[in-house]
Image (tube, rainbow, N blue to C red):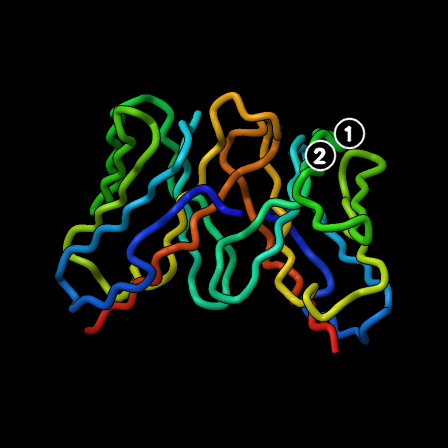
Amino acid sequence: GAGVSQSPRYKVAKRGQDVALRCDPISGHVSLFWYQQALGQGPEFLTYFQNEAQLDKSGLPSDRFFAERPEGSVSTLKIQRTQQEDSAVYLCASSVDRVSGPQHFGDGTRLSIL
Amino acid sequence: GQQVMQIPQYQHVQEGEDFTTYCNSSTTLSNIQWYKQRPGGHPVFLIQLVKSGEVKKQKRLTFQFGEAKKNSSLHITATQTTDVGTYFCAGFLSGGGSQGNLIFGKGTKLSVKP
């Protein structure tokens, strides 16, 4: 596609429910990143994939957060047993190759936990 | 916590005035990137600086990377209403252990009064 696509755009869940957020990167982009952005803050790094390999997951806040990219394209970020502090915008970004290159962001998924 | 500090947090200017935002890191950065996020939008890549003391220009925007590669600035000459948004700096730590960890500042929110 023309850009990074994320779905759903908005997600409301009750505390304790599991959620799955999808990211479809720009075709051919090797690197894929997930970020969490709280209101009024900058994006905070969660995890990074190079193709299907998850090379860095140092930003995942707890073991309730899990990300995968099984075929090196689409990625899913899963949050289990959601808590209110998980409410944020989750941004996905992709870049052509190098981890340190320019990143192209999707519109994000706004997650609200009630 | 975040290791990239950005000031000011907010800046209100009259259209035609200049604007500068500053970014400081507690550790040496391998490179620094700048992004712009419009209200309700996603971060959009503006530029990347890699070399010590590097200066790059894009029309009315001037970007600088400090000699020690710990600070950077973005200067906009003669602001226009289209410049409204939040400007983020983001850096990769030099020799950092986390491969994909692009660290964002909290951003400077620019408003322009016509």
Q: Is residue B93 left or right of residue B26?
A: right
* Amino acid type shown at disc 1: Ala
Rendered residue at 76%/57% (across/down) = A21
The 10 Å Cα crowd at callout 2, few under 14, some 14 to 19, many 20 or more, is: many
SS for callout 1: strand
SS for callout 2: strand
- The quarter of the image holding the C terminus of chain B is bottom left
* Amino acid type shown at disc 2: Phe
Tell whether label 1 touches label 2 (CB within 8 Å).
yes
Q: Position of residue B82 (x, y in %)?
A: 30, 62
Q: For mark 1, what is the residue?
A: A53
Q: For mark 2, what is the residue?
A: A49
Chain assignment, label 2: A
Q: Nearer the viewer, residue A88 or A52?
A: A88
Q: Is residue B67 above or below residue A105?
A: above
Rendered residue at 53%/40% (across/down) = A103
Q: Specify the quadrant of the image occupied by residue A46.
A: top right
Q: Specify the quadrant of the image occupied by residue B54.
A: top left
Rendered residue at 60%/48% (across/down) = A3
Chain assignment, label 1: A
Q: Nearer the viewer, residue B92 or B40?
A: B92
Q: Position of residue A87 (x, y in %)?
A: 67, 67
Q: Is residue B13 left or right of residue B68?
A: left
Rendered residue at 39%/43% (across/down) = B34
Callouts 2 and 1 in the same chain: yes
The 10 Å Cα crowd at callout 1, few under 14, some 14 to 19, many 20 or more, is: some
Q: CA distance from mark 2 to mark 1?
A: 5 Å
